[in-house]
Amino acid sequence: MAEVLFVSKEDIVRRSPIMDGNIDADKIVPALHLSQTQYLREIIGTDLYNYYVAAITALIGSGTPIPTNHKNLLENFIKPILIHLTTAEFLKSAAYTISNGGIFKRASENSSEPSLGEIKELIQVERDRAQSYTERFLDHMAFNASANFPEWFSNSNEDVSPNYESYTIDWVL
């Protein structure tokens, strides 16, 4: 069974402020998959994540619409988080290709290559944007989850419970 993606690769290219429209959207899928399965699942929790997998599968397979409250949550909160997480992940490896001949770094003929520091700054900008959308998502869930999103509270046992706080602290020594 193919992995259900919560956002299309075209949406990422269209809605990302730094991606060129000529970018090969298929190159984004690995970063999208990683961002969705690793990072987004930790933000929204296993049960809400599984709800969207089932709802999107039903929409694609039989045309069953996603209920309005869940569709609004997906469109206005979850997709923006995922777009910026994916962009940050894509930036980490976009310049590299691994093949039978080894590891290669692509370079553009017409422009200068950004420094590692500049790339790290771009990654941090995208993480900050994802963090901002995550905070909006958590504020929304604080006021609406009990009435509209029972999946937010139903995680148990080996499920990943959603993060109820969005702040992460980097250690500086």
Image (cartoon, helix red, strand yellow):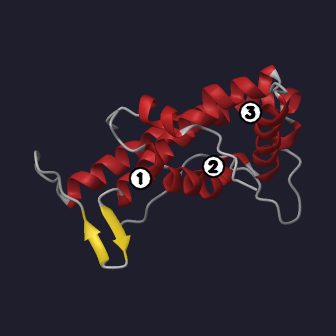
Q: Which residue corresponds to the image point at 31% horizontal and 79% vertical from the top-left? A: 101
Give the percent coordinates (x, y) of residue 169.
Answer: 48, 57
Q: Secondary structure at mark 1?
A: helix
Residue in the foreground of this view, choosing between 12 and 137: 12
Lower sequence index among marks 3 and 2:
2
Residue behind mark 1 = 90
Residue behind mark 2 = 40
Give the percent coordinates (x, y) of residue 167.
Answer: 54, 48
Query: What's under tag 3, amino acid-wise?
Result: Ala
Query: What's under tag 1, amino acid-wise?
Result: Phe
Image quarter (top left, top right, bottom left or bottom right) of the N terminus: bottom right
Query: What's under tag 2, amino acid-wise?
Result: Leu
Lower sequence index among marks 3 and 1:
1
| Label 3 Cα neighbours within 10 Å, binned few <14 / some 14-19 / many ≥20 | few
Q: Nearer the viewer, mark 3 or mark 2?
A: 2
Q: Secondary structure at mark 2?
A: helix
Indicate left or right for 87 with 114 as reference.
Answer: right
Indicate left or right for 89 with 32 as reference.
Answer: left
Q: Which residue corresponds to the image point at 63% horizontal and 36% vertical from the top-left? A: 78
Residue behind mark 3 = 142
In this rendering, the answer to whether 24 lies above or below 159 is above
Q: Which residue corresponds to the image point at 42% horizontal and 50% vertical from the top-left? A: 88
- Determine the CA span between mark 3 and mark 2: 17 Å
Q: Quadrant of residue 13?
A: top left
| Label 1 Cα neighbours within 10 Å, binned few <14 / some 14-19 / many ≥20 | many
Q: Which residue corresponds to the image point at 39% horizontal and 44% vertical from the top-left? A: 24
Is disc 1 in contact with disc 2, using a CB cutoff of under 8 Å? no
Give the percent coordinates (x, y) of residue 138.
Answer: 66, 37
- Determine the CA span between mark 3 and mark 1: 31 Å
